[in-house]
Amino acid sequence: MLFLYNLLVHCIQVLLPLPALFNRKLNLFVEGRKKVWNTLETKCPASSKSIWFHAASLGEFEQGLPVITAIKSAYPNHILVVTFFSPSGYEVRQNTTSADVTVYLPLDTKTNAQRFIAAIHPEMVFFIKYEFWPNYLNELLRLQIPTYLISGIFRPNQVFFKFYGGFYRKALRSFTHFFVQNDTSKALLQNIGYINCTVSGDTRFDRVASLLERDNRLDFIETFKNGTPTVVMGSTWPKDEELLISYINQTTSNVKFIIAPHNIKAEQIASLQTRLQKPTVLFSEKEGSDLSSCVVFIIDTIGILTKIYSYADIAYVGGGFGNPGVHNVLEPATFGIPIVVGPNYSHFAEAKALVGQNGCLSIQNQTELNDAFNLLINNEDERHEKGHICSTFVQMNKGATTTILNFITKTHPIQ
């Protein structure tokens, strides 16, 4: 099986540059990896000590950020290396100050794994949530480098738990310890013989809770809001926008709307703006605009949605009409905001929990969306009660980072 896996990865490595000529994301994937070895040679001298964190993409990086920050603080004499598999993570966070070195992870060949690990010579390694690369894991096991999974989550339908999943089950031997999000994950691991497991919870709760401690001020949002109740619609997709636009155009309530689409391509932003019948301004055109007179603010940029949520009275989180489903509900939840989502949320434990606790309302059609917004806009008590449920949910689930850090510092005394 390993032979077939390696053959497939080698074929991908050889063939990928061709389609990359015609696809921007693939081009970033290929070209970004060409810089890895020179970067490591410059920033990871042989005399240094390092700790390595790997994240598949941006979401996993943000999820692991509390642990990355805590480990960097606890082990200040180590170089902290962060790797990404996906361009959507690396291109956004390549200049993060949370790491000393940020690079793409070279493709999972045996040669790359040996060369990469030799180049950074880590004393500890952390994989965030998932991504199990057999050659890297086998090399870490061979060198007996302590390797941890943090915020791990396992489900019965994953390959590890199938009769044909022996190849991937074997790769799990490389992990010194698993820090998982829930009891189900722990039970699944134990059923296949891995008892080196702690239910620590999800570090995303620590990350979003920490958002309350930072400066979230955005002067242009304050000017636009102008003391008016505001609905922030984050990470919206076309199906979400179809319902949202209809509501915005027909409502007579004294309320403002901020839309932060998932896709900010110019043609899609233009289409969104054209269909809105209320005074609208784009982030890219805000300078010189009379923001306070506008009813809709379209955020055609990335990186500021979390701060914008701090100004919301109500949040709509998009993605719930697509597959796999709704985007991150924890960011608005931490600010004590009632949340509305589409029908597809069952794969996300935090969304499922908040819907169950009635802090989050799930809608399936235009009528239900209209009713949900009207309730939350016109009933201040309902708005505050559901917002309180959301903020309490975040606060009650904090602590994963402390659990992980206590284990690591006890196992690897700070030097």
Image (tube, grey):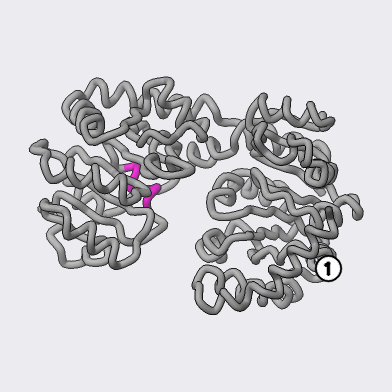
Asked whether, in this view, residue 322 is left or right of residue 405, the answer is left
Q: Is residue 112 above or below residue 143?
A: below
Residue type highlighted by circle 1 = Thr
Please identify the quarter of the rendering in which residue 309 is found: top left
Give the residue displayed 37% in from the left and 28% down from the top. 360
Q: Is residue 331 visible?
A: yes
Q: 306 or 243: nearer the eye? A: 243
Q: 383 or 190: nearer the eye? A: 190
Residue 349 lies within the magenta run: no
**Residue 151 at x, y percent in the picture:** 64, 39
**Residue 407 at x, y percent in the picture:** 76, 35
Q: Is residue 85 above or below residue 252?
A: below
Please identify the quarter of the rendering in which residue 204 is found: top right
Q: Is residue 412 visible?
A: no
Please identify the quarter of the rendering in which residue 52 is found: bottom right
Which residue is denoted by mark 1 in the rendering?
A: 111
Q: Which residues are magenta?
A: 305-310
**Residue 207 at x, y percent in the picture:** 53, 41
Give the residue displayed 32% in from the left and 34% down from the top. 340
The secondary structure that most of the magenta stretch takes on is helix
